[in-house]
């Protein structure tokens, strides 16, 4: 890993709108922040845009960073996470189709998958399993954040996730056998 000046020095330079400090902070933290964003949105193109938006906010809001309240990475992580969550909540995203038209929803172009069966399967889980799945897979929490949110030990939380995924897998086992059988026949 390259040698970087200490964060305190970089933050002072960034407060003075030093672009070189921004580039250095980008080099130092972009990979980690990109990983967080990508895990949450699961789309590389959107993740790249959100990473850029995150660093624009860091540039604009650097004066609101307070080292007494925590590490710089934690502050930048919160900006990345909130930026991503806000983008995922926006209902009016415009979608450009292959015919170069722009639509508010893609139902004209492509039928969206039906998740009602998955939702029903999740609702059949124990409440602690439902909460664990919701925190990690729908709200974008890391395991370390989610176990604190639930107030249980990390190992217990991880076992909740593992148990819930096994239960969901078992509930779909029959459907997967039918799909596999159909694929084998058509192949």
Image: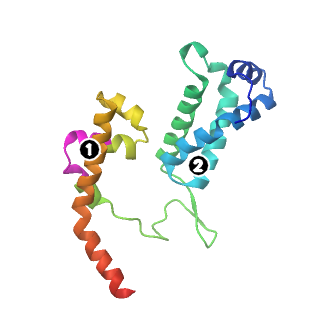
Query: Which residue in the rendered view is the most extreme toward the bottom?
Result: 186
Quadrant occupied by the N terminus? top right
Per the image, label 1 sits on a secondary structure element best described as helix
In the shown orientation, is residue 20 left or right of residue 170? Answer: right
Tell me where residue 134 appears, x and y as whole percent: 33, 43
Q: Quadrant of residue 150?
A: top left
Give the residue drawn at x 29%, y 52%: 165
Q: 15 or 68, which is in the foreground?
A: 68
The reply to whether the magenta stretch includes residue 144 is no
Per the image, label 2 sits on a secondary structure element best described as helix
Task: Give the extent of the magenta segment.
Answer: 122-132
Which residue, given by chain and number where applicable, does mark 1 sit on? 130
Q: Earlier in the sequence, mark 2 or mark 1?
A: 2
Q: Which mark is residue 47?
A: 2
The reply to whether the magenta stretch includes residue 124 is yes
Give the residue drawn at x 60%, y 44%: 50
**Main SS type for the magenta part?**
helix
Q: Quadrant of residue 14?
A: top right
Quadrant occupied by the C terminus? bottom left
In the shown orientation, is residue 35 left or right of residue 7? Answer: left
Tell me where residue 36 appears, x and y as whole percent: 53, 41
Q: Would you place residue 98 above or below residue 181 in this image? A: above
Give the residue drawn at x 68%, y 22%: 7
Give the residue drawn at x 70%, y 30%: 59
């Amino acid at each position: 890993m390259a040698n970087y000046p200490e964060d305190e020095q970089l933050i002072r330079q960034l407060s003075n709108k030093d672009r070189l400090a921004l580039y250095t902070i980008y080099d130092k933290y972009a990979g980690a922040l990109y990983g967080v964003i990508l895990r949450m949105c699961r789309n590389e193109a959107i993740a790249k845009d959100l990473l850029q938006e995150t660093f624009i906010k860091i540039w604009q809001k650097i004066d609101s960073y307070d080292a007494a309240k925590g590490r710089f990475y934690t502050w930048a992580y919160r900006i990345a996470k909130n930026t991503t969550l806000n983008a995922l909540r926006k209902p009016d995203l415009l979608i450009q189709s292959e015919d170069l038209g722009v639509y508010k929803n893609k139902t004209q172009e492509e039928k969206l998958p039906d998740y009602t069966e998955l939702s029903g399967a999740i609702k059949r889980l124990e409440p602690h399993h439902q909460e664990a799945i919701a925190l990690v897979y729908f709200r974008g929490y890391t395991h370390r954040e989610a176990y604190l949110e639930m107030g249980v030990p990390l190992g217990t939380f991880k076992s909740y996730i593992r148990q819930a995924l096994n239960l969901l897998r078992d509930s779909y086992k029959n459907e997967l056998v039918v799909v596999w059988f159909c694929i084998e026949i058509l192949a």
